[in-house]
Image: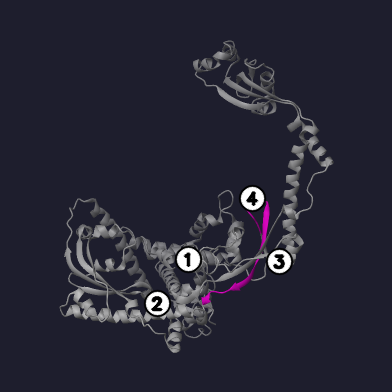
Amino acid sequence: MLQFFRNIFKSKYGVLLTLVFIGIIGVAFAVGDVAGTGSLGGGISGGDRVAVVGGDKISAAELSEAASNAVDQVRQENPTVSMAAFVGQGGLTEVLDQLLDRRAISNWARDHGLRAGNNLVNSEIRRIPAFAGPDGKFNEAIYQQTIAARKLTDAVVRRDLADGLLAQQTLVPAAFGAKMPQKIALRYAALAKERRQGAVAVIPSSAFAPKGAPTESQLVSYYNAHKSDFIRPERRELRYAVFDAKSLGSVDPTDAEIAARYARDRSTKYAARERRNLTQLIVPTRQAAQSIAQRGPGALEAGAKQAGLETAKVAEVDRQTYAGQTSQSVASAVFAAPRGTIATPTKGGLGWYVVRIDAVTSTPARSLDQVRGEIAAALRDEKRSRALSELASDVEQQIDEGNALADIAKSLKVELQTTKPVVADGRVYGSSTERAPEVLAPALASAFEMEEGEPQIAALPGGQSYLVYETSRITPSAAAPMAEIREDVVAGWRRATGSAAAKAAADRILARIAKGQSLSQALAAEKVSLPSPNPVDMSREQLAAQGRQVPPPLALLFSMAKNSVKKLEAPNDIGWYVVSLNSVEPGKIAPSDPIVAQAANSLGQLLGREYGDALRVAIRKEVGVERNPEAVAEVRKRLIGEN
């Protein structure tokens, strides 16, 4: 769940990206009181300060808001993540560490003469796409609206950006250009050709799991220690209604409205009209125009080519439009000439026009009776859209006046519906396939930010219908009561107890191997029947071909020393592995092999990260960082709702 959050600072420059994430992309991380100074002594009561960096405090409010924004970032990949789950998996600790690093580097940078002045901060603000207007340029009004929506002030945003810029100035030089010596790169590249032989044994928890039921005290103790494993996501029941043109009265136009629309558009849409397809050539002089025209209609292209010019096609143009493109005199000449002829050469704004009339399409005038149905349909659509928009405005006003959703639905004469409990990604809680009705998709994100009983309205795609909805019931994210999930807790207790016994068995197996037994003999010595070990004969190239899905036992085998045996815990309490490495065949590679250069580049990036980490640790030590565990614990309790 936290992988997205952690991946942000596991790339090329590691901690640098962490600080850029918090300092620039995570503008909203800097909130609360960020200007005070002092030490942990004295004003710490009530959890006011979670830490002091040098003389600069980090308040409980700032840490709380930083954690909230971090959860928002994680929810971009996993919408169902709850604050309790985030905190339970160490997210709050990571956020606090990042805040401490950012503040320590900022203080250290300023003490050593580095600056991020107003002009530099202004340029960064102008570069942020979220603050751009429709023309793509920075818009002051949008900037103020955006930061206000995040409950930020201009001063807080500017300090946050300045801190991020100082972090770049400090850490980029430390990490930039790091290069690993060629000999080390060669040794590292040769590892790709290395081959290892060994075996992996699985010690399943199920082989050691107790068969009987746990005592009540055992079960309660296990449940209390593992509540984070049983956290249910927040779910909400939504009430909604959809209204469209069916909620409107009659929108049929009257005869007077149809006649008025016909009178308005008669000259432009219903009068007789002629359209022509033309081939035209523009030349600079009258003499040249007449010379080309005298050759006849069929020679227009040839005459243009001989003069070093090209003709242009004009399709389906009427007289008024063509006059706007050329001039009234040119249009008069062209529309007076018969089809298949060249019009009298006439001077326009760009020169002399030589125009051939290729086709003529005439449309006769249409009477009111002929177009009555067409006009009625257009007016009906216009009146329907206008009336629907007015109805939506009326519903919005009812919402502003505090009317209940049931009363609004009644006034619209539409059915009010209620969903099953749904989670933030639209799934019905407890179902792997059922989802919330598709019509709610545009409203799900806002529905999970609303309070209960506060209706909202949203236009549905296409603009022909509207959704009015509210959150009718909120069930917060929390550990499920043990009584409701007793079977799951019992199963978890069995797995955990079996895992502990499997670990003890793995320790016994390791001890037997240390005394000279083979892996197979050590496994057979156990009182329970265990699977035979799986032999492994693989090169690092074959391991790398598996991509990111490398099984943990194989990863361990390729990090062990020859003739060693180690144990490894399997995920989710399913058991333990015993990994034995029998032989290592070193790889051989030529210094000119391209993989050596790739290895040097990769190692250079890791070395740059190490330099950045070392500088960060040294800066923390020099500036001085002091935490207040009690205040951090209070923030944690508030975030997960234990207060």
For residue 570, side relative to residue 264 (left or right): left
Report which residue position mark 3 lands on.
405
Q: Residues within 10 Å of mark 3 (few under 14, many from 20)?
A: many
The residue carrying pointer 2 sits among few (fewer than 14), some (14 to 19) or many (20 or more) residues within 10 Å by Cα, namely few
Q: Is residue 467 magenta?
A: yes
Q: Are marks 4 and 1 in contact (CB under 8 Å)?
A: no
What distance separates the C-alpha of mark 3 from that of mark 1? 33 Å
Point out which mark residue 462 bears.
4
Q: Residue at x 24, y 51 (%)?
A: 594
Q: Nearer the viewer, mark 2 or mark 3?
A: 3
* Left or right: 211 as drawn, with respect to 333: left
Q: Residues within 10 Å of mark 4 (few under 14, many from 20)?
A: few
Q: Please, which colouring scheme is shown?
A: one colour
Q: Amino acid at mark 3?
A: Leu
**Measured from the top left, where is residue 239 in percent x and y?**
65, 66
Front one among 471 and 175: 471
Q: Are the residues flagged by discs 4 and 3 in contact, CB closer than 8 Å?
A: no
Q: Which residue is mark 2?
A: 624
User: Is label 4 or label 1 in front?
Assistant: 4
Which span of residues is magenta-colored?
458-479
User: How far across and down, in percent of the image, does residue 429 sit?
Assistant: 54, 69
Residue 8 sits above or below residue 515 on the image:
above
Give, as a three-letter code, the residue at label 1.
Val
Q: Are marks 2 and 3 in contact (CB under 8 Å)?
A: no
The image quarter in which residue 576 lies: bottom left
| Rendering coords of residue 60 (x, y %) | 51, 77
Q: Which residue is mark 1?
A: 74
Task: Relative to 348, say whether 453 is above or below.
Answer: below
Q: Residue at x 44, y 66 (%)?
A: 5
Residue 74 placed where, x, y %?
Answer: 48, 66
Whichever of callouts 2 and 3 sits on the residue coming sooner in the sequence is 3
Along the polypeptide, which appears first: circle 2 or circle 4?
A: 4
